[in-house]
């Protein structure tokens, strides 16, 4: 934003400091002039004929007062300049850090030493902001790289199959078409997931009353055949859990949680429990599943895009793109809610969502 040139903050502080010193000195000299000299007799002999008169003292005092004012002006300007420079030194460091950040360097930190004051509090807040920005930018870069990698795989497969069909049309059979359809389906699913994730992060959607217990029952009924194929028992418990939000996004949230709980489970005899309840001013949805034990550091990364708990799932009909919990996390934040993911002691996960009632 272009601005007209003006006085620097240091010069303004200097002039202000010098002005205060000069005004204070002038007031003191005026008080001394008024309260001292007015009691001196104004005659030729002075007080008792031995002390100077008012005229003589005025000339002597006036000359001293003039020198004192000159000293105060110089002292105010020089001292104000040095004091302002010392006081504004932290602000200069903050400005340099902001300029570096504007140039793209987010790794620089101010780390202003000394005891807490306004400047150091500002520097600490700015360091925290830079840390979050650096983390966010790094996350976005990883997301873009992972998205490109995930999209490149099905597109490369599709390209190879099309090249093969073009070179020898006689080899086009049902198997090749099925593989081409699966690769295209995966690319479409990934694109739709990315669009849904972007929509959840924007948060621009109409809100309507939603009962999570009804959503959970509908999702469980839809995914029950998939659970039976994997020999996983699926139970829905609890009562009503009413909130307001996007019915489509919240259904996607519950679907992703239940689907992940079914797929990432024991090979046989696993369980998935979906529980809903109303707690004070919040509605709660909790999804628990059995499965292999997960380290705490892995659990913390599951809500990041393209994370699959350290393994890529490609063995069955649920290929997955690693965006399930990322979409859940984004949608929950867009609904002003909280997401809690913890590892169960015996293996598996416990995912809890709290939304405003």
Image: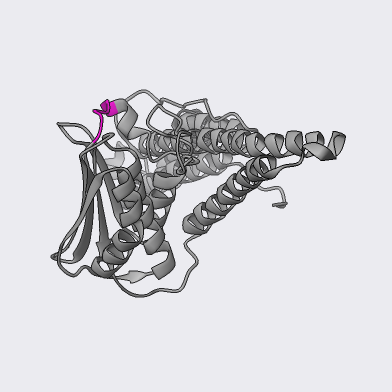
Visible in this render: residue 196?
Answer: yes
Specify whether residue 179 is painted magenta. Answer: no
Q: Nearer the viewer, residue 138 or 228?
A: 228
Residue 222 image position (x, y, % from top left)? 35, 61
Q: Nearer the viewer, residue 77 or 314?
A: 314
Q: How is the image coloured?
A: one colour
**Res. 311 image quadrant:** top left
Q: Which stretch is magenta?
A: 291-296
Residue 2 vs residue 13: left or right? right
Residue 45 image position (x, y, % from top left)? 35, 43
Residue 148 image position (x, y, % from top left)? 64, 37
Q: Nearer the viewer, residue 322 or 243?
A: 322
Specify whether residue 292 is painted magenta. Answer: yes
Which residue lies at the image location 58% right of the left edge and 45% below the top edge? 186
Q: Quadrant of the C terminus?
A: bottom left
Visible in this render: residue 257?
Answer: no
Residue 4 image position (x, y, % from top left)? 72, 52
Q: Is residue 349 above or below residue 211?
A: above
The dominant secondary structure in magenta is: loop
Q: Nearer the viewer, residue 123 or 268?
A: 268
Residue 267 vs residue 79: left or right? left
């Amino acid at each position: 934003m272009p601005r007209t040139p003006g006085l620097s903050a240091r010069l303004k502080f200097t002039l202000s400091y010098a002005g205060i010193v000069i005004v204070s000195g002038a007031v003191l000299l005026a008080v001394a002039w008024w309260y001292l000299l007015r009691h001196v007799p104004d005659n030729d002999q002075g007080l008792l004929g031995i002390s100077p008169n008012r005229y003589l003292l005025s000339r002597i005092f006036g000359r001293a007062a003039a020198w004192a004012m000159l000293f105060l002006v110089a002292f105010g300007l020089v001292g104000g300049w040095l004091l302002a420079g010392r006081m504004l030194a932290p602000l200069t460091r903050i400005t340099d850090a902001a300029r570096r950040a504007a140039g793209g360097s987010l790794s620089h930190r101010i780390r202003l030493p000394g005891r807490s004051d306004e400047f150091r509090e500002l520097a600490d807040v700015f360091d925290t902001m830079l840390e979050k920005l650096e983390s966010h930018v790094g996350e976005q870069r990883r997301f873009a790289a992972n998205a490109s990698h995930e999209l490149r795989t099905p597109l490369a497969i599709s390209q190879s199959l099309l090249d093969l069909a073009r070179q020898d049309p006689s080899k086009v059979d049902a198997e090749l078409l099925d593989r081409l359809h699966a690769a295209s389906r995966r690319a479409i699913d990934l694109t739709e997931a990315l669009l849904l994730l972007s929509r959840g992060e924007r948060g621009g959607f109409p809100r309507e009353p939603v009962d999570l217990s009804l959503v959970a029952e509908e999702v469980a009924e839809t995914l029950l055949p998939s659970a039976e194929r994997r020999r996983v028992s699926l139970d829905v418990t609890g009562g009503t859990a009413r909130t307001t939000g996007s019915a489509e996004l919240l259904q996607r949230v519950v679907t992703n949680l239940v689907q992940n709980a079914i797929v990432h489970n024991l090979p046989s005899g696993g369980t998935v429990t979906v529980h809903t309840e109303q707690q004070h001013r919040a509605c709660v949805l909790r999804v628990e599943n059995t499965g292999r034990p997960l380290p705490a550091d892995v659990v913390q990364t599951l809500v990041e895009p393209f994370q699959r708990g350290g393994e890529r799932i490609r063995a069955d009909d649920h290929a997955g793109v690693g965006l399930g919990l990322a979409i859940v996390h984004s949608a929950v934040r867009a609904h002003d809610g909280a997401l809690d993911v913890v590892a169960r002691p015996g293996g598996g996960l416990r995912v809890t969502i709290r939304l405003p009632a």
